[in-house]
Amino acid sequence: MASTATINGTTAAAADRISHTPKKSKLPSTPHQFITPAEIASEFSHHHPSVARINNGSFGSCPASVLAAQKEIQLQWLSQPDDFYFNHLQTGFLRSRTIVKQLINADHIDEVSIVDNATTAAAIVLQQVAWGFAEGRFRKGDAAVMLHYAYGAVKKSMQAYVTRAGGHVIEVPLPFPVTCVDEIVQEFRRALQRGKTGGRRVRFAVIDHVTSMPSVVIPVKELVKICREEGVDQVFVDAAHGIGCVDVDVKEIGADFYTSNLHKWFFCPSSVAFLYCKRSMESYDLHHPVVSHEYGNGLAIESAWIGTRDYSAQLVVPKALEFVNRFQDGIEGIKKRNHQAVVEMGEMLAKAWGTHLGCPPEMCSSMIMVGLPACLGISTNEDTLKLRTHLRDKFGVEVPIYYREPKNGEVGPVTGYARISYQVYNKPEDYSKFRDVINELVPEGFTCGSLPN
């Protein structure tokens, strides 16, 4: 495997720890007739023309050619569903699984299941953790660890499955803004030690590869290694922003379970994801939470039929790969260029507003956190939603806002951060528009307190 490159002055060793710098593509793109800017614009011409869409991280984006392929699959099903069910559905799933296996460097196709989204994958994994408590493999009160910045739906799943089954959930507090990887590693080690107090064992850990809000690339390989050293039974990496955004090599990462959406950064339509389960975990009897006719035939087969529904998003993965490979260096080139562009745009915004980034460039992926001027008066989570709505409705800027509670003694702290994304359809003027809107609001004396509830 190619060695890790240096990006924006980051040392190779530091970049490797957070596993986001580009490596040689396992699925190389065709070296001729790369996609042109005009063709990119045509592929995304269905995007609202007057909106600066700098929030790819929330829902992703799907090019017209992939949408057309999805529609064709939908029509195939509707025209003759019996033929499609018996002769095409499973082979289509197998093609999608095979592509994912190659992308993530899995050992065997049986390790890969195609599911709706990362939330479904989390439910599959956490369901078997709950059975571990219910069936006596784990003791009541044993611990499960997750990051404080874990995705909200995963936190709810931990509550629904693990806490309810008798597990003790420990959240790892993470600093923000964050200045280096070691801050995360130290807090994680301390959380594992807390999990062992009172004779408990840490049975399970869920680790984000890229946290959602605030967005930071987590050193997953290092944290998984620590889990192994500390005797954690199972490790699950929630990488909703994985494929197409950071490097994903499941053998290098070493987790038992790994999930990533394919509709966020791999150009599939909503919604499709994969769940990787290391073959050694087969004895844990994983099942899809929606039980249908394929129950007991293995997770991959169960997930490929959970009742009559539209499976087209999960079958169009080959077409998404075809789109990706129209770009120079395929997905690796896209990742590298998006990362460089989002850092450039983030630094431009921070300089214009006199603020700072939420993390060093080497700890961001294709998303980065940018401090907003303190005078905007962002003082609650409700303020972030009101400001986001105001930016959307009045100015045509779509960007999520994060509230950071100030520490004691801070004077004039930056409490609001915008999470900007960069995807192939974005242009510098999208970010200039955002810059100019904020620069228009500040001299007017605008504050979030002036917005209606």
Image (cartoon, rainbow, N blue to C red):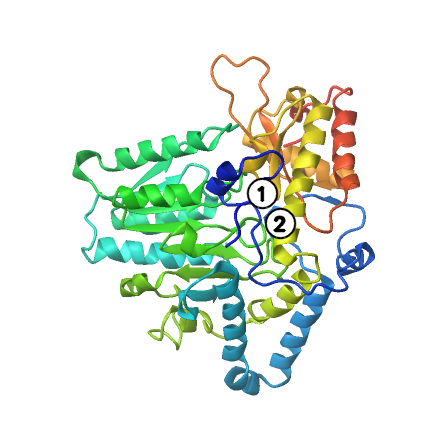
What amino acid is found at the position of numbered circle 2 in the picture?
Answer: Lys
Position of residue 375 relative to residue 69, above or below, is: above
Mark drawn on residue 365 = 1
Residue 227, quarter of picture: top left
Mark 1 or 2 closer to N-term?
Answer: 2
Could you say whether the residue bearing mark 1 is in a helix, strand or loop?
loop
Give residue 335's mark.
Answer: 2
For the point 63% across and 22% down, the residue is 377
Q: Residue 126's x, y, as percent?
A: 35, 54
- Residues at discs 1 and 2 in contact (Cβ within 8 Å): yes
276 over 218 or under it: above or below = below
* Residue 72 showing in the rendered view: yes
Residue type pointed to by label 1 = Ser
Residue 61 lies left or right of residue 296; in this view the side is right
Vertical position of residue 248 compared to residue 172: above or below: below
The x and y percentages for residue 289 are: 39, 63
Location of residue 207 in the rendering, given as x and y in whole percent from the top left corner: 41, 45
Confirm whether residue 214 shows in the render: no
Callout 2: 10 Å neighbours few (<14), some, many (20+)? many
Q: Where is residue 290 in the image (x, y as percent from the top left)?
A: 41, 66
Measuring 40% from the left and 73% from the top, which residue is drawn there? 292
State the CA–CA distance, disc 1 to disc 2. Answer: 8 Å
- Callout 2 secondary element: helix
Quadrant of the image containing the C terminus: top right
Of residues 204 and 424, which is closer to you in this image?
Answer: 424
Is disc 1 surrounded by few (<14), some (14 to 19) or many (20+) residues within 10 Å?
many
